[in-house]
Image (spheres, rainbow, N blue to C red):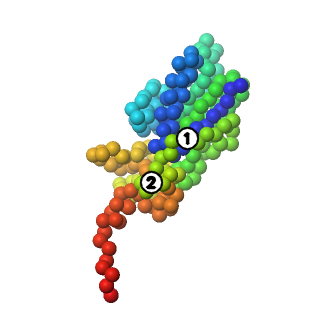
Amino acid sequence: MAELTFWTGTMDAGKSTLALQTNHNHAARGRVGLIFTVHDRSGEAVVTSRLGLTHDAIEVTDDFDFWRHAVDALTHGARIDYLICDEAQFYTPEQIEALAKIVDELQIDVFCFGILTDFRTRLFPGAARLVELADRTEVLQVEALCWCGKRATHNARVEDGVMVTEGDQVVVGDTDRESGAAPSAVSYEVLCRQHHRRRLTAARAQSVSLVPEPLPFG
């Protein structure tokens, strides 16, 4: 029986890497699949991993119809055994429902990969619908770490060096951790709950630690 599976974790947890590995494993066994993505960090219709892996993909716009795309392909003689859906948190609830319909009616496996919550710690509508409909929701075993070393559970948005908790839900950015890389206007950082609540990013924590403590006089 086909299944709708949702693999989730914070940024830096390796979701896109697992998506590409899943595609490789199934393709190696002679299965035929389609890969979808939206708002990839590269800005193109391609799934990219921070480890350097890439694969061409079909870009999912808000009006993209998964059901119609699959039915049209099958009607014209194509074979589809599975779908890989990266950045699934950005899909609309209606698109998630269409993926569930594809699993149930066409018996095609659907593997979704995405994060649960946004920088405000609110569920993405697409992720929420996946949790409600998926046959299985799996948490990635590779733990992303906060700058303090604790398990990262929240995604923080940093704009011009300052962590923000208000704004549009979807703003494309990436985690800027490569040494020597210039920070972008909008970037993301994974934090533990405690430091997300305190808005204490790695840069801010470092600046605070460099401030000389007053002498214990008076």
**Residue at far bottom of view:** 218
Of the pair 78 and 195, the residue shown nearer to us: 195
| Residue 82 pos. (x, y %) | 60, 24
Q: Amino acid at mark 2?
A: Gly
Residue appearing at x 51%, y 37% in the figure: 15
Residue appearing at x 65%, y 24% in the figure: 108
The quarter of the image holding the C terminus is bottom left
**Would you say residue 38 is visible in this rendering?**
no
**Residue at far top of view:** 77
Among numbered discs 2 and 1, the one appearing first in the sequence = 1
**Would you say residue 201 is visible in this rendering?**
yes
Above or below residue 144? Residue 216 is below
What residue is shown with label 1?
140
- Distance from label 2 to label 1 (Cα)? 18 Å
Determine which quarter of the picture holds residue 215: bottom left
Above or below residue 71? Residue 172 is below
Is the residue marked by circle 2 packed among few (<14), some (14-19), or many (20+) residues within 10 Å?
Answer: few
Of the pair 60 and 127, the residue shown nearer to us: 127
Determine which quarter of the picture holds residue 26: top right
Q: Which mark, by number, is residue 36?
A: none
What residue is shown with label 2?
149
Determine which quarter of the picture holds residue 137: top right
Is the residue marked by circle 1 packed among few (<14), some (14-19), or many (20+) residues within 10 Å?
Answer: some
Helix, strand or loop under label 2 = loop
Residue appearing at x 29%, y 71% in the figure: 212
| Residue 107 pos. (x, y %) | 69, 23
